[in-house]
Image: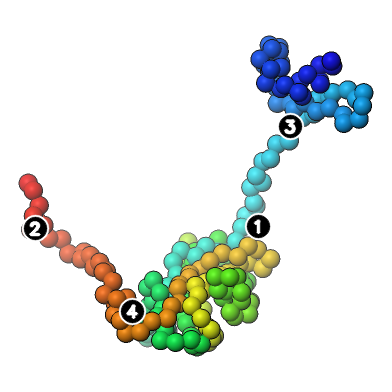
Amino acid sequence: MAWADTCCAAPWRHWRACKHHRNDATHNFRHAKHRKSGGEGRLMPQSKHRRRTPSRAEEPPLKITIALLCDDVRRESNGKELLIGVYGNRIILPSFPMALNLTVWMRALFRRPGPAKIEVRVIDDRGQAILPTITAEVLSPPEIKDESTIILGAAPFQLHGPARIAYQWRPPDGEWKEIVGIKVEQGGPEKIGKEINVPSSTVSAQPSSQSPAGAQR
């Protein structure tokens, strides 16, 4: 029996028996043999699957750091942005079909100065498009280290049943990434009341001189 045949038939047995192969620096080879009758075995270098690091030009032009779904966003004269009707875990509607008109407020960190083209779409949990893909141009802030606000203006669409909707973005010909998603469910006043009564936490930044109630010293 040829050496290569033995090696391919029982590779671990050969590994234990072949001391020089075990200690050789060229161990990173795999054994292969010809399928044809009478073929001889040969050594082939093992393929190395190294993940190529993308260049800076291939990286997405921006990184979204936070995103909120709301009814509307207004900008005050002092530069502050007023978010109206910010949604939490879900949207509860009395019936379907129903038209929705939502706005996405988000903050983004740009990797390169200047304008950047992005594509945005809205899909449901089956991957079906709710709104067609749009192409927009967003501007980086004067200081590239600063974050910038991007507002996806309200675009009405209609839902025909309960679903999870997701806003996604990508650079042209890039991979889709989720901006924000939310469940849309059907329910009456009782379900809306439960959603309203979901516990929320408010933390005060005011330092307290008193110890919390029940704290052990």
Say what secondary structure mark 1 lies in. Answer: helix
For the residue carrying disc 2, how many other residues have a C-alpha within 10 Å: few (<14), some (14-19), or many (20+)? few
The CA distance from mark 3 to mark 4 is: 60 Å
Q: Are marks 3 and 4 in contact (CB under 8 Å)?
A: no
- The mark lying in front, picked from 4 and 1, is 4
Task: Kindly identify the amino acid type of the residue bearing the numbered disc 2.
Answer: Ala
Q: Give the secondary structure at mark 4.
A: helix
Is 63 displayed left or right of 216 in the figure?
Answer: right
Nearer-N-terminus badge (4/1) = 1
Q: Nearer the viewer, mark 3 or mark 1?
A: 3
User: Circle 4 sits on which residue?
Assistant: 191
What residue appears at the point 42 percent right and 84 percent down from the top-left corner? 93
Q: What residue is pinned by disc 2?
A: 213
Q: Along the polypeptide, which appears first: circle 3 or circle 1?
A: 3
Q: Which residue is mark 1?
A: 58
Q: Which of the 4 image quarters holds residue 2?
A: top right
Q: Earlier in the sequence, mark 2 or mark 3?
A: 3
Mark 2 to mark 3 CA distance (whole Å): 65 Å
Q: Earlier in the sequence, mark 3 or mark 4?
A: 3
| Amino acid type, callout 3 | Gln
Query: Is disc 1 in contact with disc 2, using a CB cutoff of under 8 Å?
Result: no
